[in-house]
Amino acid sequence: MVRAGLRNGYMLLLFVLFSISLNEIIIMGNDLIAKAADGVLGGQQVYFAEFVVPLLWMIVLGTAAAYLKSISGSHYSAMVQRDVRASLGRHLIRLPFSYFDEKSSGSIITRLISDMDELGRFFSEILPSLLVNIIVVVTSTIYLIQMDVLLIIVLFASYPVMLVVADRLSRKLAQLAKKLRSHMDECNEKAYDAIQGIVIGRSYNLYEVQKKEIDAVIDRKVEQACKSTRISSLGWVLKNVITTIPVIICYLFALYETMQGRITVGEMLAFTVLLGRILNPIGDIVFCANDIREIGVSLKRLQEIYDQKEERTGGRIHIQPQDNEESAVIEWNNVEFYYDHSEAHPVLNGMSFQIEKGGQTAFVGGSGEGKTTIFKLLCGFYEKNSGQYRLFGHSFEEWDLEAARSCFSEVSQNVFLFPETIRQNVACGKENATFEEVVEACRNANIHDFILQLPEGYETLVGERGVRLSGGQRQRISIARAFLKDAPILLLDEPTAAVDVEAEQKIQEAIDRIAAGRTVITIAHRLSTIRDAKRIYVVSGGKIVETGNHEELLERRGVYAEMYAKG
C-alpha cells in the first residue's frame, strides 16, 4: 500500500505544489487589499486600476491553480486506489490454500469491499484535505508572523484543549470501528451462508431461524454504528465550540494590537480574513485523528492479508514431462502432514506409496482418513510437514508450482462452475482455447448434444455455481474442461457419487474416454467403481494399511474385504 502511494508520488507532488500556489495567490491578494485599505485610511490617493488589474490576474491564476490542484488530487486518489486494489487482488489469489480454509468468505469479502472503501476514502478525501490544511496553516502562519508574532502565539495557545478532546474521541471511535468491522464480517458470513444454503434452509423451514440470526447481527452492527455516530456528532459539536473561543480571543487581541498601533487597520483586516482560513484547517487537522484512527482499523485488516506469505512459486522445472520419462509418476516416502501445526494429530502419518505411469490407481478408506488430503498435497495446495514427494522423478520442491499443477486435471463430485457461459467454463481448461476445441472437448464429455438443445447453446449462462444445470450436466462440463486441459495425470474424486443411473452411465463413458493414455488416480467411496484398478491403496489412520488389486485384497480378508462386504 505504501509502495502504491510512492509510485504515484509525482501526482501528489503536483497536488502539493498547486495547493501552495493557490494559497500564496490568496495571501498576495489579501495583502494587496490590505495595503489599499491602509492607503485609503491614510489619506493617500489610491488608483482603482493599480490594484484591480493585479487582483483580476490573481483570480485567473488562482482559478487555474485550484482546477489543477483538484485534477492532480483526484488522479492521485484514483491511481493509488487502482494500484492498491490490483496489488491486493494479485496477492490474495497467490495466498496458500490454508488461508481460505481458515478465513470465512464473509470476512474476506468485507475486507475487499468495505475496508477497501475506507482506504479509498483516506486517499480521496482525508489525505488531500490534510495536506491542504497543513499548507494553508503553514503559509498563512508565515505571513502572520511577519505581520505580528504575538498574534500567532495567542492563536496557537488557544488549542491545547482541542488536542486533548480530539485524542480521547479518536481512541474511542477507533475501538468502535474495530467492533463495527467485526459485526460486518459476521453479518456478511450469515448472509453468505443463507444464500449458499437456501435449499437446506427452505427444506427444513429454517427461514425464521436464519432471519433471527441475521437480525441479531444487524442489531449489534446498528448499535455500534449509532454509538460511533453519537461520538462523532459530539466531536463535531465540541470542535465548533472549541474553535469559537480562539476566534473571539484572536479578534479581541487583533483589535488591541491595532489600538496600540502595532498593526495597521489594513493588517487587522488581512488578519481577520486569514484567521478564517487558518482556524478551520487547524480544527480539521486536530480532529483528523478521528478519521485516521478509524481508517487505521481497516488498514490493519487489509495489512493482515498483505502479511500472509504467498505460496511458493520457485523451482527450476517449468515444463510437463515427455512420454519417454521414467514410469514412476508419483512417489511418496514417509510423508507426514498435519493442519495448524498440530503434530499430535497428524492427518497423514508416515504415508508411502508409488504410482506408476498409465492405468488406474485408487485410494479407499473411511471418512476422515486423509484421502482428500492426499489430493491437496499432490497438487501443492498444502505442503507436507516431512517426508519426500517426487513428481515424475523430481522432488516436488524443484517444480515451479504452476508447472506442477499443469500436470493434473481434477474431476470432483463437488463441481464448481463460474457464473459465466458454458463455453467460458469449458474454455478455462486451456488458455486461448478456440471454439472448435471447446466443442470437441464437449463431444468427448457427452455433453455437446445437450448444449445444442439449449436456446443460447454454448453461450448459455450456467448461473452461480452452475445452479441452472443438473448435477450430471455440471459433471460432464467439468470433464470437458479436463479434456481441454489435457494433463497427463487425472484425479477423480468419485465423480459419479451424487448422480442418477442415466447420468452416471454418460459420465462413466466420458471418464473412460479421458482416462485413455493417462495416469488415473481415484478416491473411491463405492468400491464397485474401482474393481479394475491396477493398484488399490487402503488408507486408515493416515497410513497405507493394505495394497493390491481387487482380487488380492478380497483374498486377504482384511480392511478392504470388510469394507466391500458392507457395500
Image: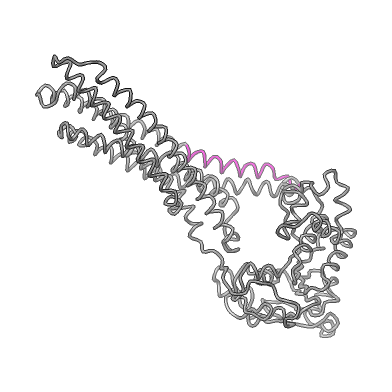
Vertical side of 118 occupied by 336: above or below: below
Vertical side of 103 occupied by 389: above or below: below
The percent position of residue 533, horizontal first and vertical second, equals 82, 77
Tally of marks? 0
**Occupied quadrant, residue 455:** top right
* Residue 112 as seen in the image, left or right of residue 522: left
* Residue 550 as seen in the image, left or right of residue 249: right
- Seen at 55% across and 75% down, the residue is 343
Vertical side of 255 occupied by 507: above or below: below
Colour convention of the picture: one colour
* Residue 563 as seen in the image, left or right of residue 33: right
What secondary structure do most residues of the magenta stretch adopt?
helix
Which region is colored magenta? 203-225
**Occupied quadrant, residue 558:** bottom right
Camera-nearest residue between 45 and 546: 45
- Seen at 85% across and 46% down, the residue is 454
What is the residue that sits farthest to the left in this orientation? Answer: 260
The percent position of residue 50, horizontal first and vertical second, equals 24, 20
Q: Quadrant of the C terminus?
A: bottom right
The percent position of residue 84, horizontal first and vertical second, equals 50, 50
Residue 224 covered by magenta stretch: yes
Residue 261 covered by magenta stretch: no
- Seen at 78% across and 76% down, the residue is 361
The percent position of residue 57, horizontal first and vertical second, equals 33, 25
**Occupied quadrant, residue 388:** bottom right
Vertical side of 54 occupied by 525: above or below: below
